[in-house]
Amino acid sequence: MMILSACNIDRSPYDSITSDDLASSESSAQSVTLGTYSRMKAWSDNWHRLFEYPSDNLALSGTTTDPLFFTYNYQRIPNGSRVVGFWRSSYQIIVGANKTIEALEEGTSAANDQLLAENYYIRALMHFQLVNIFGRPYVQGRDNDGVPLKLDGDHLNHPSRSTVGEVYDQVEADLLKAASLFNEDKSNAYASKEAAWALLSRFYLYKDENAKAIEYADMVIDSGKFSLVSTEKLADYTKMAPETNPETIFAIKFITDADYEYNGWYTVGSLYANIQGTGWGEMYASRTYLEMVREYPEDRRYGFIQPKVVDESITWALYVDNANTYKWKEVTQSGDDYTYSENGMTKTLGKLDNGHGGYHYFVETSEGNKRVLIDNKLDLRNGYPKYYILKCSGQEDQVHLWSPVISRLAEMYLNRAEANAKLGNNDLALQDVNVIRERAGIPDIGLYTTANLGEKSVMDVVLAERQLELAFEGHRKVDVFRNNRSLDRSYPGTHLAGSSPVSTVAPTDNAIIEYIPEAQLLVHEGLTQNP
């Protein structure tokens, strides 16, 4: 859409391929399709930031001139480069897919049908992600403004906004078409029939068509092509190349060295951690997420978090005060107890049986008792303890290399769990939740039954497990708002700095969807802005 032509689909030797070339040569169509996959690498950077940064999984430790700050703190601007870049690259990819779709005739060869399938899938993925950023959740109404549906390769054709429902209808049609045409088994670095099924499962979950969400999750699970990574290897999930990972259904493949510019300093993972001297390490796991993932010491998902320890001889009890500021006491361990000195007196942390063989610890303050997390003395940035996130780093031992996962098997179990919870099939929902918890290493006492939920609902449990398992993969913000829940960000982070802090975001808030890039309003007649 943005001043596009066939010659700028990708900066590669096949840039000059024309529509006639595409129609007359399977190899030309394949080359352009490979170029479309290649363009998805740059697309994935802004995709991750726009979907993950507004969640309650993260805490930024300072301000920044990068427009990512405005997405993180729900203070939208209409011309931020992150949003502009996401819009532009999404439609560039769509146009590239459209040119291939227009050029190939279905049914003329198995190779053509495979290429058509891949491009229908890619077009569906782009439109789906666009409508989830710029349009309100489907469950809030089909007739809300969505995004322009771009269904041709003509760069001079600028469609106006379709409704959310119209975009969803097209995404569904494209995914079903793709699923019917796939006929090759490639690696998970390429779209596949199972990738289409996986996205359909998510699509129907978002649409609240829960029986269909279950149906397509079942199809992926029952295909036998994927298996959950073992408990022992879970924390190394993103260190594997996609093709060697049995759980990954589809990932955007990044190649060692070749896709590693500036020694990894400007990758997604570089903002989450400094490893071997590379990375900014300025955005950390939130206190909310830390308390969840550390509830069970056996939970291997905590392996994706690395506290930046500066002195192993000193133990801290870290807590958060009423102003959402980190505080700590230097403590000494004695058996199950921790003591500290205050005003010349020795005090003991309060403790409460956590119900599974351990304790929650509390410190007494003038504001009341505050829960603490016990860690060695940590490095700080602007008063924020550094809890590095490793889930977007370390592929094939390259510090911040990472292949973003679009779909993986664990999500299918969680999609099925949520859909069953909404249909009232509580035992089935908890069964799938427990599959994921067992794989994470959580002992039997931490598995759920309908009798041990306490004040939690089955949906509470399902959504909490989605947050634990799918954190830092771009799901959480959408999961909250599409379920008409509010996002609680009452924890330390610079989203609470300044004169307009945002600690709670309602699903009806205008800020849950991004502004349409301002420049697009000037060139697209009839394109309207979000409120």
Image (cartoon, helix red, strand yellow):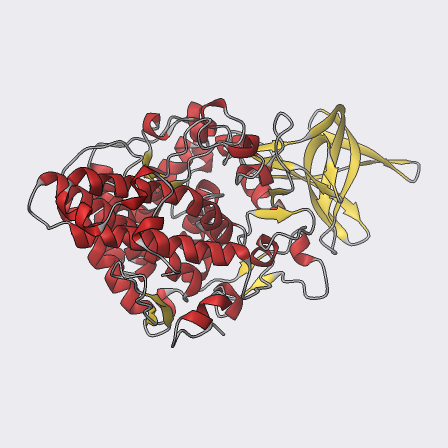
Pinpoint residue 54: horizontal percent, then vertical percent. 54, 55
User: In the current view of this chain or complex, which residue is farthest to the left?
Assistant: 108
Q: Residue visible at 42% across and 47% down?
A: 43
Task: Answer above or below: position of 519 versus 365.
Answer: below
In which quadrant will I find the N terminus? bottom left
Query: Is residue 214 among what the camera can see?
Result: no
User: Residue 271: which quarter of the image?
Assistant: top right
Task: Answer above or below: position of 207 versus 510.
Answer: above
Pinpoint residue 126: horizontal percent, then vertical percent. 34, 54
Pinpoint residue 313: horizontal percent, then vertical percent. 77, 22
User: Residue 330: which quarter of the image?
Assistant: top right
Left or right, residue 256 beside residue 66: left
Q: Residue visible at 67% across and 51% down?
A: 64
Task: Answer above or below: position of 256 versus 223.
Answer: above
Q: Residue visible at 16% across and 35% down?
A: 184
Query: Is residue 374 among what the camera can see?
Result: yes
Task: Answer above or below: position of 313 versus 402.
Answer: above
Tell which of 367 and 217 is nearer to you.
217
Q: Residue visible at 40% across and 33% down?
A: 438
Tell which of 401 and 314 is nearer to you.
401
User: In the current view of this chain or complex, which residue is farthest to the right?
Assistant: 344
Left or right, residue 1 beside residue 109: right
Tell which of 318 and 271 is nearer to you.
271
